Image (cartoon, grey):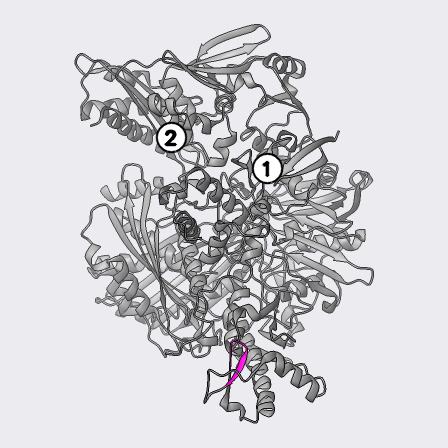
Amino acid sequence: MQSYSVVGKGLIRVDGRVKATGEAKYTFDLVLPGMLYGSILRSPYPHAKIHNIDTSKAEALPGVKAVITGKEIGPVRFGCIDTPRYPADQCPLAIDKVRYIGEEVVAVAAIDKDTANEALSLIKVEYEELPAVFDPEEAMKEGAPKIHEIIIPTTTTAWEDFGVARKARPYEVINNISNNALIEYGDIEQGFKESDYIREDRFVIPSNAHVSMEPRGALARFDSSGRLEFWTTHMGYEHIRYWLAKVLGMPISKVRVLKAYVGGAFGDSCWTYPFQFLAAFLSRKAGKPVKITLSREEVFMVTRLDHRMIINSKIGVSKDGKIVSYHVKVIQDVGAYRGSSPTTLYLFHVFHDPIYHTPNLKYEATGVYTNKLVTGPRRGNGIQQHSFAFESQLDMIAEHLGIDPLEIRFKNLRKQGDVLSNGDKLDSYGLPECLAKAAESIGWKRKRGNKKNIGLGIGNSAMFCGAPNYPFGSAALVKVNPDGTVTLFTGGTDFGQGHDTVMSQIAAEELGIRMEDIILVSGDSETCPYDIGNWLSAGVYTSGQAVKRAAADAKQQILSYAAEALGIKSDGLGIKDGYIFAKTNPDVKLTSLADILKYSIQRHNGDPILGKGFAKCVSEVEFWGGSYKGTASLSRGRGRFTDAYSFAAAIAEVALDKETGKVKINEIVIAADSGFDINPMNVQGQLESQAVMGMGDVLFEEIIFEKGRVLNSTLGDYKIPGALDIPKITTISVQTNEPKGPYGAKEVGEGARAAVWAAVSNAICNAISSRIYTLPMTPERILEAIKRKKT
Amino acid sequence: MSTSFGYLLKLPKFEHFEAKEILEACLLLSKYGERAKLIAGGTDLLVSMKKREVIPEYLIDIKGIRDLSYIQYQRGVLRIGAVTPLNDIEGFPIIQERFPILASACHQIGTPQIRNLGTIGGNLCNASPSADTAPALIGLGAKAKIMGLKGERTISLEEFFVGPGQSALQDSEILTEIIVPELPGLSRGEYLKLPARTTIDIAVVGVAVIVTFDPKDNKIGDIKIVLGAVAPTPVRAHKAEKIIIGKTVEGQLIEKAAQVAAEEARPISDIRGSAKYRREMVKVLTQRAIKQVVRI
Amino acid sequence: MRQSIRLKINGDLYEVRVEPWWTLVEVIREEIGLTGVKEACSTGECGACTVLLNGKLVNSCLILAVEAQDKEIITIEGLAQGGKLDPLQEAFIKFGAIQCGFCTPGMLLAAKALLQKNPQPTEAEIREGISGNLCRCTGYVKIIEAIQAVAKGEF
């Protein structure tokens, strides 16, 4: 077992101090000279035609510097998904129609917020209300109101820009269907024939919200040469740049996204929002910087919500509990625009595959437009919905067959080395160990069936480690400084998950220097090289690998010059704490990084020692030369997706007040296989956070809609867990040392929440000996389920 | 979602007056009528204004009126100025000792930050059916002292609540003081709140029970059962009380009284809970509160 | 009509011209430029706008700037003294109690107010003390551990 100096240690965050003193500047805090404030007029109707917009009075208000409508911007579209088959479908401002309450209609920039808000009240919009539809099953029926007709691409798609010579096709929306997926292998009908027991259940899952502490915002500044500087709440600048450039019709090199601290993301703001484009458009028009910040209520009204799904799931098992056949139909209520649905529906299946061995499978999924808020990833993108349904069914199957729910999971888990249906290989697979350790920690054998009024439940999850989707890969640069410190340039975005710290640790470990000697430049699209971003679960896995290689490259240069200078072969040298030593005599400091830099500049004509490193997810997959090789098909499931999966097993113990239906969670144990914990303290923080978030989702978090209107759009009406609500949380790290990960590291921070969903849900249902097929499991629903069982 | 531009969560424009004396506040209220609102802690009012639920043009700030912020205990009678912050009430030693139900009720309102700003008068005058101080105070037989241009009057707190968001204050009247009379010797009370979702949350049901024991035979001399969040105003469960008064308490009697209390509730359904659930919880909480108070 | 008010923040005196409808958090952030205090919900639910007002923990999004005149206000910028971090700040950093950092200023002030009133709090009392400060990133576990460590005198 290798011992490391810097990685594998719970070192403090590099940005801890500035956050603890209040110095850290978030987009919300930024002020530029001459800055204007933007405000957005939003649709009060879920579905309506726009006949006329009169902005004259608003434009005449003293202090108003720019007003923009959809007609002025034109029908240029953006989206999370933009492929030849599913072209982008949303415009920054509605042009002839609005499709959800809160949709952006007019944007205003003024000298202060009061004036901007007053200007909104002076704008007259003539709407003609149209019949709206809110239920996806209703929306698919003949005669339902048509939310979209035909989506005609207005530009090339991202795929085409990256070399796939497939023209974007117009997408005709029939029966409000936005996208489809069909993945199958084996023979499910034969499988069901061979099954000893078959369960068929229906689950309905509502939306919940990210509630990052920083409300979303953007600050845009155009200079007189037409360059755009942009600060925003986001998860990766390549995506932001790409879409800003495209929608604004400017070269991508003229769009610079700069670093601002980000107050939480959780999947929200991984792709672009109208308010971001609007800040840029207003800035260009007014010739001044423009900042748009959303109020908390706007955040609930217009930012993407977690996916609403109706899941019809049929599982066939043998009498000893082995899965034989699995047929699942998912209807996803995507909202007024497609959002991330094609990816989500694909991932629902993809995250099932690495967990359980399933010989026969048919997965049918449909995304359906409705006149509600758009949906997007929220800490898990399909896995949590899948885990809730599948793990609930496993428990019910176990009960019917008289098998221990723990044993039934072990029976169906995969093994290391398995190759999945899409060709991905599980080089590391720690789930069995995770499950065993979680069970031991919570005392599964001792407690199960032995205590009154408590329930135990299990959940499993899987998460990918980056994918070969745009932006495809990451690069990093390392520069040695005259005082022996090293500057690391890596483009990733830290929104709290500790990316900056972990990258610094990797670089320091690889180089052989102290953590405090790393100076980090991150999150700036101009000064940093290319980066995949932190929303494809590729932060550590891909960007970390790029950083490691850049550091290794610099180290190799340093050692080769040191070899020259010292007359010792470079493979006989090492670096520790910034000093070079001979392996035969490790305690003697021979020379330093600072000295080697001087040597390099003096003796090698100014060579500054720059290290370069890069990494791509799934190197076998490529887009180039008009074709693409081996990419995953979102709708067919075939094709390589990722190089590694991380796993989590969660077990929850709950106590129930059977008179009020109130749940007290006694404990949540999460055991996660994250490959190797570069920063154990960080990893613990991620797991603890997911325990609390998952618990909130199961017990009370839900966006309540009424005719397309969000009823609970303030933090008083949408509650998230506070310090008085949290249970005992135990986190366990299982290290499987993924061969392709930097130091063996994999993703952590997104998948475990799904395991917690399933664990807490199953624990509650175990405590009441009844089943609830929807979320959240409110006290009322629990009491009803108890009554149902009695009758 | 808030109406019109409520989604921006910004305060509308208004003029702000700092009243130095009660009379000054009454005069301003009289002058501006419907267009003015009193502001004390502001924890309810400012939120409503940001949501554009109420849009007063004038705010009359009464925080600075010294005569309105105090806690006095004399000869067994507790007098609390209307603009006294909830935290001060919760932490006052005499209240913790002699009127613990009131300290408990104040403690269950919101967060520490809110309790430092919010006042007892604000909690009562906002007249939410789920106001947490109301059931306890009504159970304690509290009275409300009201000052207006026409003079002063004192009414029982039970009469203070007229409808959801509506108090008995007329025209230019201001609530100035809460008077809690001396409790008879052997009295105990409990306020149980069922928060809607998280530990800190609005009540989906609140029940206050105050029992006075007859010193001769330890039967129930008097009982007050007050229900919150299950009717347009906080309400006494009179019928339920009658079942228990003068009796020796035991399990079945308590259950019966709790059932009757549930029938006396008139709850509505909203995003926090259905009427059916609320009614069931009145029974559960009433039963628990009585049992806790009589120590069964 | 803007009026001139005096605000005393972290011991410094500021004179600003404000409208009656401007909240204290808006004025501290935008007129005075101290952006450590954050506005995350605007309705007094999350505690990100927490400041100490005459020693009391309050939500500055629910206080009008004009109401704060002549009162002692402490924001996060006033926690560290002469460049030296407060023990709570050191502990938060060391224990990993900070992730995105947006709730951190308010959370630190709540912890400070708690320990000032109750230097040896139980875990339950710590949770009560920070019950008005929401965090979405950490799950609160390390925040509580950090405060416990300071109470034990480890910093």
Q: Is residue A578 magenta?
A: yes
Q: Which amino acid does the dot numbered 1 rest on?
A: Ile
- Disc 2 marks which amino acid? Val
Left or right: A630, with B252 as reference point: right
Q: Position of residue A623 (x, y in %)?
A: 60, 78
Asked whether, in this view, residue A476 is left or right of residue A266, the answer is right
Above/below status of B183 relative to B126: above
Residue of label 2: B205
Which residue is under mark 1? C73
- Is residue B224 positioned above or below A216 on the image? above
In this rendering, the answer to whether A469 lies above or below B212 is below
The percent coordinates of residue C8 (x first, y second) are 64, 36
Q: Which of the pair A398/B29 is nearer the observer?
A: B29
Chain ID at mark 1: C
Question: Can residue A12 be seen at all in this image of the molecule?
Answer: yes
> Residue A553 at x, y = what percent?
58, 82
Task: Check disc 2 and report its element: helix, strand or loop.
Answer: strand
Q: Quarter of the image containing the N terminus of chain A?
A: bottom left
Q: Residue at x 41, y 28 (%)?
A: B91
In this view, the residue in front, B192 or C17, is C17
**Looking at this rendering, what residue extends furthest in the top direction?**
B150
Badge nearest the viewer, 1 or 2: 1
Q: Residue B85's x, y, as percent?
A: 49, 26
Q: Residue furthest front?
A: A588
Circle 2 chain: B
Residue range corresponding to the magenta coloring: A575-581
Q: Main secondary structure of the magenta part?
A: strand
